[in-house]
Amino acid sequence: MPAAAARSPEGSGPTRELRIHGVGGSPGPKMLGYPADSDVVVVGEGRGGSAVLARRSDPAVEGYDWGGLTSNSGSQPLWVLLLPFTLLNVAGWMHPAKHDATFRSQAVVMRWLVHALSGVLTAAYVFNFAVILVDLVGYQWARRVAAQMEAPAPLPGGVAWQQRLGVGLGIAALTALAVLLVWVAGRSRSEFEEVGLDPALREDSDIDPAAPWGADEGLDSLGFFWHPRSAGRRLLVHKAILALSVAMVAALAVVRMNHDVRPETLDIGASLLGPTYGLAILLVAALWAASALRPRAAGPAVAATLSFAALNAVFAGTVLLVVKRLSGWPAVAGRGAPELVAGPEASLVDVWGGVVLVLAVAALAMLAVLRVRPRPVTDVPTRTSGPGHPLDGVDDAGRRALAGAQSMARLARRARPIAFGLALGLVVLDFVFVWVRLDTTSWVVESPRNTNQFFYRVGAYVLPFLPLLVVQLVRRSRQRRTILGTVWDVLTFWPRRFSPLAVRAYAERAVPELQGRIAHHVLHEKAPLVVSAHSQGSILAFAALAPLGPTCAPRIGLVTYGCPVTTIYAAFFPAYFGPAAVENLRIKLAEPGGDLVGWRNFFRSTDPIGGPVFGAARPAHDVELADPARPSAAAPAAAGPPLEHDRPAWIDIAGHSHYLREPELKNWVVRLKSALNGNASQPSARSSASVVIGEEARSSDRGVEGRLGPR
């Protein structure tokens, strides 16, 4: 019976179901079980690509489609250039839970170190581009061009007018880059960070718009995703750093052109980039010291290390590639052609090239071992049924595939120690090779001498193209649910409180819109609600439900599947998704009674992303689903949407997909909706505005065809 036909005895609205999809782009009608747009209707729209869809045949089942916030931007391929800023921004959220004075002081120290590193990273970005645009291309390559002119300036001394023009154009390009970064950050801030809380909510809550950024730190605060003034102040600081860095480059270039006795290079890398990276290494080392080398507390150090390592590796490889390509072009006939000179900024290219090779070989070897020698599966029966008979188990090929899927899932859940080991290894390598190649007489790392060595060649031709590879992998992850897509959504979930130049956080739009839709049903329509969330959608649901109070939360049931709350978020962000936060949300939600619980989580052993949320302490809240599917003892459910028919037994391995084809999960949702509908009660006298984000739930003259969330 359609949910819309059932009414609660108190006369409130019918129980509604609101689904939230995971990674994999914008699923549209598929989220509701239908293959075509004609089977669904848009009942609410947000800004920038989000929408709320409902089934035409059963409007009580809706889906929040947020994929457009991350996949519909035309500038998405360029986001990879902001990856170092995004990694460093995430580092600020990875501090340990502040459950005692020691951890509180540790968290404060880590966050201030991340703030300092954020400023250093912004300056390092400018100086890296300055080496390429101003020194290599603008000065050195212009010198080579001047050498083939009919009346060039004397190359052993003095500066040709072509070099002055090239440096001027390089500084102009560097300035344009800084302006572009500021423009992108400012535009996304106005579209995301400044759109959040409804004015009535601000009046009815304790949120102070003028409060500093740290005033609302927990997910259980309505102000967590709304911080326009503090975001503006942070952006202003980084604008100043960008302007100062460009000015330093311009001043150094002018001085070196006019007074330097070595005209072959401006030495921007040695003069500006070297001290900047030296400061970054010291600050990263301080982060490692603050975490006392503990994997559970070293999240900020890990993310900061990977951020600066990625920046240095890609730019160093790009510098060497530019040197190699431009040193022979254009050819200068009849004269000694000056070649481009790589400075100390390229001194670790061979190291990064070697690291890339080692990681690639290690990854392939690990995958080969898992494929050839996975852990055997002993709890699945062997297929004995013949052709034409119902399947009763798996064959040898299916057993091997199942063992491989379970091994990959176990490996993915060890992401924290793997990331810890990788980052710590990079820190040790950095210190060792910087010290070995340091000229103590001038305190400058020596420039590469023979760039034709094998690892230098690998670094020059592999490192610059890594961002392009990442772009393609991220784009593919939008079409299929992949680990990389999940990692990208984890990185871009968090507000940009530590680096305003990071990729904009989709949660700053998605979470307030979700809260507005939830409150529309529960408070305006007075209907109980079941929130059904998959994968990253369960994180959005968690963040949207955590701050809701006793007026709203007790009328809401939550069903999660493929949920990374514990496997990923609690491991890396314990202060916001740890056991205490999970328990706080659990006790807020509905209590249907009997054997029903307000929040149940479903997972599979073959799922590399989702897993148990509550652990052995609450077995009723975590349910492991068999994969491959087993024959169901219950009678088959009535025919539903075509994409949600029950999974056939013993056929395929679903892993992270097709949870809504599981009979046990579907039956649970039906029972929970029925129980909430029968136990629905009127909301208390507390004003709905105190828990609603968005104008839709406050406007009595709007139906479900109104706009989603705040405008």
Image (tube, rainbow, N blue to C red):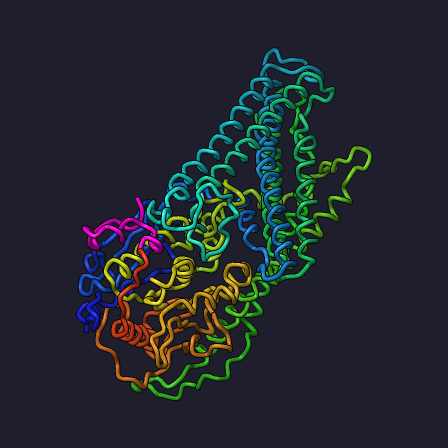
Is residue 327 found left or right of 688 in the rendered image? right
Residue extending farthest to the right is 441
Residue 701 colored in magenta in the image? yes
Is residue 129 found left or right of 198 in the rendered image? right
Q: In the rendering, at what x and y percent does residue 185 appear?
A: 46, 38
Q: Nearer the viewer, residue 234 or 380?
A: 234
Residue 709 colored in magenta in the image? yes
The image quarter in which residue 47 lies: top left
Q: Which of 483 and 531 is in front in this view?
A: 531
Q: Is residue 399 above or below residue 588?
A: below
Residue lying at 29% horizontally and 72% vertically, measured from the top left: 676
Q: In the rendering, at what x and y percent does residue 101 appear?
A: 64, 58
Q: In the rendering, at what x and y percent does residue 517 appear?
A: 30, 56
Segment tinted magenta in the rendering = 688-711
Q: Which of 438 and 453 is in front in this view?
A: 438
The image quarter in which residue 349 lies: top right
Is residue 448 found left or right of 687 in the rendered image? right
Q: In this view, does 321 lie above or below 297?
A: above
Is residue 141 found left or right of 583 in the rendered image? right
The image quarter in which residue 560 lies: bottom left
Q: In the rendering, at what x and y percent does residue 147 appear?
A: 62, 18
- Image quarter where the N terminus lies is bottom left
Residue extending farthest to the front is 685
Q: Is residue 23 visible?
A: no
- Image quarter where the C terminus lies is top left
Q: Is residue 398 visible?
A: yes
